[in-house]
Amino acid sequence: MFKKFVLTVSLGAMLASLTTSTLSAHAIYPNGDPDPRHDTAIVAPYGSVTYRPILFSANDEGLVSVTGDGSSMLDVAVYDERGNLIIHYAGYSPYVSFRPYWVQGMTIKVRNLGGVSNTFSMQTN
C-alpha cells in the first residue's frame, strides 16, 4: 500500500514539473493566462520551439512574423489541426501569411537552422 502511494506521488510530481516547464515557454497575459500570439524565446542550435494551438478565423488572413537576432537562419512553419503543413519560410526574420478555410487551431513551429542559439520574437494576428 505504501509503495503504491509513493509511486502515485512520484508520478504526480513528475507530471507537474513537465507541465510547468511546458507552460513557461509561452508569454503570459497580466492576469496570468498564457498568450501564444506574442512570445520571445531562445531556440537552441538546430532546435525548435512549437506553439500550439493558436486559433485563426476562417477567411481572414493569418499572419506569423518571426524576428531573429541575426545569428542564424530561422524556419517558421504553420500546420493545420490535422498536422498538415500549410506554409513555411526560412530567413533571418521570416514572415508567412495564409487563409484558413475554417476556424481552427494552428500549430506554429520555429526551427533554428544554424549552429548557434538564436533569440527571436514571434507575433501572430
Image (cartoon, rainbow, N blue to C red):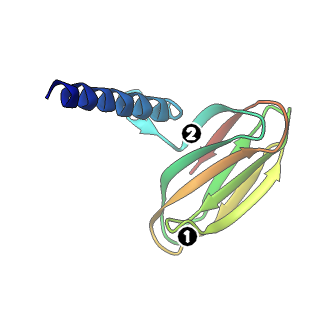
Q: 28 or 52: nearer the eye? A: 52
Q: 3 or 14: nearer the eye? A: 3
- In the rendered image, the residue lying farthest to the bottom is 101
- Looking at the rendered structure, the secondary structure element under dot 1 is loop
Residue carrying label 2: 38
Q: 114 or 95: nearer the eye? A: 114
Left or right of 54 on screen, residue 49: right
Q: Residue at x 49, y 53 (%)?
A: 54
**Amino acid type, mark 2:** His
CA–CA distance in space, label 1 to label 2:
20 Å
Q: Is residue 118 above or below residue 52?
A: above
Q: 118 or 56: nearer the eye? A: 118
Residue 28 screen position, x and y as percent: 46, 31
Q: Residue at x 20, y 31 (%)?
A: 4
- Which numbered disc, 1 or 2, marks the residue that appears first in the sequence? 2
Badge number at residue 9: none
Left or right of 33 on screen, residue 65: right
Task: Using a 10 Å C-alpha cutoff, classify the residue at mark 2 as few (fewer than 14 neighbours), some (14 to 19) or many (20 or more).
Answer: some
Q: Is residue 111 above or below residue 56?
A: above
**Amino acid type, mark 1:** Pro
Left or right of 108 on screen, residue 44: right
Residue 86 screen position, x and y as percent: 64, 67
- Looking at the rendered structure, the secondary structure element under dot 2 is strand
Residue 29 can be seen, yes or no: no
Residue 29 screen position, x and y as percent: 43, 32
Residue carrying label 1: 100
Instruction: Kindly indicate the quadrant of the structure image that contains residue 85.
Output: bottom right
Q: Residue at x 86, y 32 (%)?
A: 71
Left or right of 33 on screen, residue 25: right
Residue 17 can be seen, yes or no: yes
Task: Using a 10 Å C-alpha cutoff, classify the residue at mark 1 as few (fewer than 14 neighbours), some (14 to 19) or many (20 or more).
Answer: some
Q: Residue at x 48, y 53 (%)?
A: 53
